[in-house]
Image (cartoon, rainbow, N blue to C red):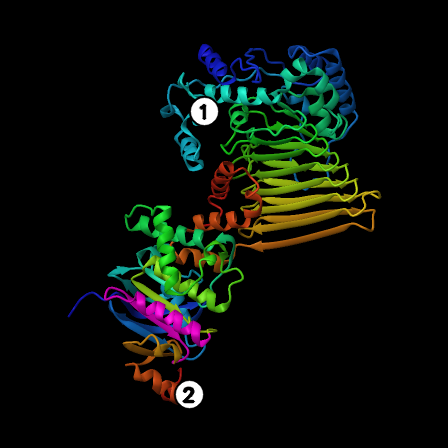
Amino acid sequence: MQAEQTALDELVQGDYKYGFESNIEQDVLPKGLSEDVVRFISAKKEEPEWMLEWRLKAYRHWLTMAEPRWPNVFYSKIDFQDIIYYAAPKSMPALNSLDEVDPELLATFAKLGIPLEEQKMLTGVAVDAVFDSVSVKTTFQGALAEKGIIFCSMSEAVREHPELVRKYIGSVVPANDNYYAALNSAVFSDGSFCYVPKGVRCPMELSTYFRINARNTGQFERTLLIADEGSYVSYLEGCTAPQRDENQLHAAVVELVAHERAEIKYSTVQNWYPGDKNGKGGIFNFVTKRGICDTRAKISWTQVETGSAITWKYPSVILKGDHSIGEFYSVAVTNNMQQADTGTKMIHMGENTRSRIVSKGISAGKSQNSYRGLVKVLKKARNARNFSQCDSLLIGDRCGAHTFPYLEIANKDATVEHEATTSKIGEDIMFYCRQRGISAEDAVALIVNGYCRDVLEQLPMEFAVEAKKLLAISLEGSVG
Amino acid sequence: MTTTPLLQITDLHAGIEGREILKGISLTVRAGEVHAIMGPNGSGKSTMASVLAGREEYQVTSGSISFNGKDILEMSPEDRAREGVFMAFQYPVEIPGVSTANFVKTAVQEMRKHRGLPPLEPAAFLALMREKMKLVEMDQQFLSRSLNEGFSGGEKKRNEIFQMAMLDPALAVLDETDSGLDIDALRIVAEGVNTLRTKDNAVVVITHYQRLLNYIVPDVVHVIWNGRIVRSGGKELAFELEEKGYDWIKNESPAEV
């Protein structure tokens, strides 16, 4: 089994120059967190001294911090000494064919339209030697290398490109930024690193490749993406396929740096296990995502959040440079007992900066869905403009939708617009659809997809198709 | 001839929130026929349409509805629709972000699935939509617009008939389709309906006024009052009503005991 697993990993991760490192080891640390654990992780990753020092500093700071209690979510206290902070990638059961995979999971894959080979990857079925991932990667390798784009795992970047990592890590989300960011900084497991050189337009969505490699990056993922002057990159994170994980707590950090005139488009689909109907199990997803824009740069976050028991996430943009643009497009779906407190922060520092927020919250079952957004215009930010649209859709009468907009405006030139709506899928609209032969469940899917169109349009097309199906699946059983 | 009627409603009693609105409706509609249901406001016309289409807020307390020989009272609204019951709504809903084309496609593919037909290919579907839109003089730009969003009253009603054309139902119930239409829109809608008539389908026109019946000529006119059909007759009954007003019926009918 182990041999098969290794073979699988090699096939997936390979020895591709820009690929993820294949590092199969068996050791698992005992539960608990201490300086020794931080040192152990750093040593395992063969990190340079400065990286270890950075981690230790974060750890020491974390010890002085308290867990945030302001989000509108409720859960029992997390015991941070009851968590394993280092484990080699867990071996997935190597199966011989998809026939051995849980049929329910396969049914979900089929509904999502996930290609067969990718289904195998996700379930750990032994894959054909001819699996085209290799050729896909070869193509990637050629295309990316030609342009001088660096795209690799965080661990590899620390070793191979220490000057870049050292320069940028923590430059957007400092190690002491918040409780979970500090924890992540101390013990981050792995993640992705991307550097796009000056004037380069990344020739492809960094997506398919990432999806296949997304598993086992660990519960403390760290991503750093740098777009140098005048460059462009579109990055896709996550997977519509349901993701299970033994680790309940996930605390990721994502940092984006957009230099002068650069543009970063960052799309996320998050479908972590949300727990069962009664709220048992499910992932706690506490994420810090932030980007910084230099002059005339643009950062656009698009997220479709359907998973996790608890989501705590505010992808933000610091509009430092004049004429820079920040965008946030979000769909957050909660069903059953899920809780989401998500939104964004747009910090206008430069002159003529613009930001746009489109948030669509959908609550069903007994779930609670909160939008929390900050628009801050500093004194120097002349002619800053913001437009926010925050819509909530309720399905059924036992769920909740909440909106917490914060506006801090220190410049009277600023134009800030905030629109909010709350609506229900009413009997009239449901009956109309059903009278046309559309089942109640399909009607909800249709209505919800329409409701989210402004956000889904922002996703790369293929992914949008999957995301639509995902929304439908997430809301299954919400009417009836 | 003793063919099975397309629709057979027998002594139907139904109401909402414990209040009885239909107090024993019986109606037989055969394929190829057009029936008009007339009556003053609050007489139960629209309730009858809603109960027929399966709206769940209404409770049927007794009686039966048989469609094509099948008891449809236990069927969900979507199953009734798939069996061939179509209702043109008095107040069609708006669905933001869902294009008319996408909505109609979803409905048509469901219908085809139910009838054991393969889904229509996109090109064939588009061609079919274009053809049917001409029927009600609808501009193609409506296909990409959100369903009924920002449509005028007349455009919404034309969109209903367009959907009827796409779904090809055995029975179409037009619930006050004429309300809020100017004379041109009325003509277009009526001509659309007439074009769709065949010997195999039937139309039930629910209306307050005789006006629409100049264009869609009924075989039978029923007058409903206080939850019962109090009079049935030929198309001349509609003229009589128009002339004498509903008070004529109200005064002639026995008062509720």
* Res A123 label: 1
The residue carrying pointer 1 sits among few (fewer than 14), some (14 to 19) or many (20 or more) residues within 10 Å by Cα, namely some
Which of the 4 image quarters holds residue A172? top right
What residue type is disc 1 on? Thr
Query: A212 and B86: which one is in front?
Result: A212
> Residue A35: percent from the left, percent from the top?
73, 15
Q: Are marks 1 and 2 on the same chain?
A: no
Q: At numbered mark 1, what does the secondary structure look like: helix, strand or loop? A: helix
The mark closer to the camera, 1 or 2, is 1
Q: Any mark on residue A169, and which?
A: none
Of the residues shown, which amino acid type is indicated by label 2? Asp
The crowding category of the residue bearing disc 2, from other C-alpha atoms within 10 Å (few below 14, some 14 to 19, many at least 20), is few
In the image, what residue occupies the spot 32% across and 70% down?
Answer: B194
Whether residue B17 is visible here, answered yes or no, is no
Mark number for residue B247?
Answer: 2
Q: SS of the residue at dot 2? A: helix
Q: Within the image, what quadrant is residue B14 found in? A: bottom left
- Please report, as a chain letter, where disc 1 is located: A
A47 sits left or right of A322 in the view:
left
Locate residue A164 relative to residue B125 in the image: left or right.
Answer: right
Q: Which quadrant of the structure image shows residue A61?
A: top right
Residue A357 in the image: state x and y as whole percent.
Answer: 66, 45
A82 versus B152 height, above or below: above
Is B150 inside the magenta-drawn segment?
no
In this rendering, position of residue A52 left or right of residue B205: right
What segment carries the magenta color? B182-210
In the foreground, B170 or A32? B170
Mark 1 → mark 2, Cα distance in angstroms? 73 Å
Q: Name the spot of residue A306 as percent of width and height, x first.
A: 55, 39
- Residue at x 37% of width, y 66% of height: B61
Q: Position of residue A368 (x, y in %)?
A: 61, 44
Residue lying furthest left: B1
